[in-house]
Image (cartoon, rainbow, N blue to C red):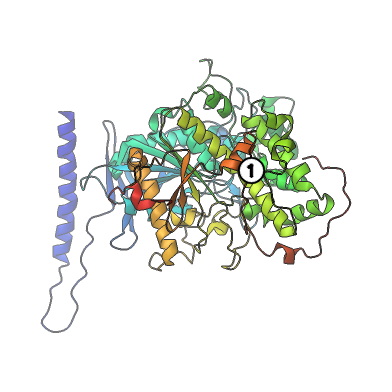
Amino acid sequence: MRTISKFVFFLFLTWREGSAWEADQQKHARFKRIVGGKEAARPPLDDPIAYIFKEDHFAKVYGSRQGLHPHSYYTFAGLRYAQPPVGKYRFQRPKRVKMEGDVMGIKYAAPCVQPNPDFPSQMIGSEDCLFLNVHTPRLPGSGASLPVIFWIHGGGYRRGSAAQYGGGYLTRRDVVVVTVQYRLGTFGFLSTNDKDLPGNVAMFDLATAAEWVKDYIEFFGGDPANIVPMGQGSGASSAVFMGLSNVTQGRTRGMIAMSGSPLSPFAIDDKPQERSKRLAEKNGCPTTSTIEMVKCLRELSAEKLVAAETELENEEISEKGVQSLGIVLTPAPVVEQTNDKRFLPSYLEEEPRIALDMNHIPKIPLLTGVTKHETAGAVSGRLKINISEQLKQFPNFIKEVLLPNLVESNKRRFYAATSLLKNPLQIFEGKYFAKVQKTLQDEFNQIIEATSDALFNFPAYLISNAWSKQNIPTFFYSFDHIGKLKGVEKLLKGSLLVKQEESTDEEQTAVSHGADLPYLFDLRSLDGTPFAFQNESTPLEPEDEKVRNNLLDLIASFAKNSNELSVDSSGKTTTFPNFISILPESTLGEHFRECQMNLWSGIQVAKPCSPLTAIIKGIDKLFSNITTSTKKKKPDLPKLPRLSDIVKPKP
C-alpha cells in the first residue's frame, strides 16, 4: 500500500511540474507568421530533475544537461554525501547525510585540500569536500536501470578531484558514472596505527559514498544491485580495497583497476607512526603522547599541514631518486588492528598479500590493466637529472643498484622465500636485459622497463593470478596505443609519475601512466573547468577514435555483464592469463610478458626476454655531456558489444 501511495505521489508531482510548464508555454506561445520571424526553438525533451522518494524523506534534485545531441546526458554535480569533516571532526570517520528538500546539483564542489598544482607550496581546496557527482544518460521511467561505475580518482592519495572526470563518453554506452571525492593526504590517511588515530578515514569516505549510491542511484537511472568500483593509480588500489574490505564487500558487483593494485609497493603505508611523527615535528607538535599530538595537528591550519606534507614529500624524492617510485611518499591506507568488537570496525584487517595467500578473496569479477610504459613520464621527466647522475657515478647502476632495490621494495608486499630473494642477480643475469647497454638512451629505456614491471605490471599480474586461481572471472588488458590525445600532464600535474610539461607530438613515443584516461573521460581542471583542447565536437584522429571505442566497449561490457567477455568470436577464452592489447585493432594475446613475469616471480627462464624498444627518444641529446666514471660505493636505496567487436584474435 505504501508503495502505491508513493507512486501516486510521484505521478502527482510529475503532473504538477508538467502542468506548470504547459501553462508557461501557452502564456509565452509563439506562432509562425506568414511573413518574417523564425520558428521558435523546441523546448527541452525533459527537465534535468531527479525525484528522491524514501520512506522518511523526499528530495528534488536539480541538475543540468550536458553534451551535444545525440550524446547529451544529465549531470548532477556537488551532491553532499557526508557532513563536513572540519573542526573536531578532522581525522574522524565521516557522518552520512540524507538528501532532503530542494537540492541544487548544478555546480561542482571544491576539491579536497591538496597542494596547488601550479604553486606546490600553496594550498588549494576545502576540508568541506565530501561530495560526489552523478552523470547519467537517462532518468527513471525511460528504460531499464543501468550499471553504475563508481569512479575513484588517482593522484597518489594526495591529489585530484571528482570534477576532473566528465562522464560524457561512458554515458554513451548506457552506463551511469558516479565520481567521488574523498579526503586526501594527511586529512584522509594520517595514522598512528592505534585507537587514537587508526587512519583510513578516506577509505570510510568511499564506503559512505558507496552507501549513498546504493540508497539513491535508482532515482538517477542506476541499478543499485550493479555497482562497479573503478579507479586509476591509487584509485585502482582503493577500488580493489573496497572488494577486500568487510565494510564494503557486499556493495560491489565487480572491480576495475587501471594502473594500480593493492599489491603495489606504494599502496599501503607500513610506517604510519614514523610518518605522523615527522609531520608533527615539522609543525612543532608534541610526539610523546599520541592524544596530544593528534590534538595539536587538529588545531593547525590546513595550509600548514599541506606545506609540511609537501616538504616531506620533496625530501623523500630528492633523497631516494628513482627509488622513490617504489615507496609511499605521503600518508596512505594502513592495515588496522584486527576488529575486536570493542571499537569501530576496521577497514583493512590484514595485509593484501596475506589476504591473497589465505584465499580471502571475494567472488567478485576483476578487470585490471596497465599502460605499456607506466613509468616513462617519471623517468624522462622529474627524475631524469637524478637518474643521469646515478648512471654517471655507477656504471652498473641498473644491475647492481636498481634491480636489487626494486626486489627489496616488492619483498615486503608479496614475495615468499623464493630464490629471487636469495640471489636476485642470478635470476636476472643475462635474461631480463639481453641487450647490451650501448647508449644512455638504452639505459633509460631499461630503467623504464624494469620499474614498470616491478611497480605496476607484476603486482597487476599477481592479483590477476590470485583471482583466476579461485575461478573468478578475471580479465587483463594492456593499453599499448601511442595516441595524440592530450591532457594527462595537466590532469595529474604534481604527480611524480607524469612529466610536468606537455609532450609534443614528436615526443609522444611512450604510453605512460594515465595515457588511457583521455579515451574514457573528458578531462578537466580540479574545479571542473574543461581543458581548452577538450572539445566534444572536434573530430579525433581515426586511430584515436577506434581506440576510444575499443576501451569504452571493454569497460562498459564488463560493467554490464562480465560473462559476456569470457569468449571471443573464435571460441578462445579471454580470461586471464590471456590479455587484451588495446590498439586501433585490438588483439587477444597469451600470457602477458611471460618471460619477465617469470623472472620477477623467481622462476628461471630458458631464453632471454625480448626487450621493449624505443620507449623514449632523444635522451642522448639532452645529456650529451654525461659520461661514466669510476665505480663508487652504492647508494642506500549502447548495445552490449561482444568481445569480437572489441578485440581480434592474433592469427
Judge left or right: residue 556 versus residue 524.
left
Judge left or right: residue 343 versus residue 389.
left
* Image coordinates for residue 391, horizontal then vertical, percent: 79, 52
Q: Which residue appears at 48% of the width and 28% of the height?
A: 245
* Image coordinates for residue 226, horizontal then vertical, percent: 33, 37
Q: Is residue 622 above or below residue 449?
A: below
Please identify the quadrant where the N terminus is shown.
top left
Picture mark count: 1
Q: 397 or 233: which is nearer to us?
A: 397
Q: Which residue appears at 31% of the width and 59% of the height?
A: 71
Examine the rendering and report whether any part of residue 221 can be seen.
yes
Examine the rendering and report whether any part of residue 77 can be seen.
no
Q: Of the residues shown, which amino acid type is indicated by label 1? A: Lys
Q: 55 or 554: which is nearer to us?
A: 554
Q: Which residue appears at 59% of the width and 39% of the height?
A: 597
Q: Is mark 1 on a helix, strand or loop?
A: loop
Q: In this view, does 278 lie above or below 395?
A: above
Q: Which residue appears at 74% of the width and 25% of the height?
A: 288
Judge left or right: residue 628 versus residue 151.
right
Q: In this view, does 45 lie above or below 468?
A: below
Judge left or right: residue 421 versus residue 615.
right
The image quarter containing residue 146 is top left
**For mark 1, what is the residue?**
607
Q: 615 or 203: which is nearer to us?
A: 615
* Image coordinates for residue 280, horizontal then vertical, percent: 71, 35
* Image coordinates for residue 643, horizontal then vertical, percent: 35, 47
Question: Mark 1 Cα within 10 Å, few/some/many (few <14, many 20+)?
Answer: few
Residue placed furthest toward the front: 606
Residue placed furthest toward the bottom: 35
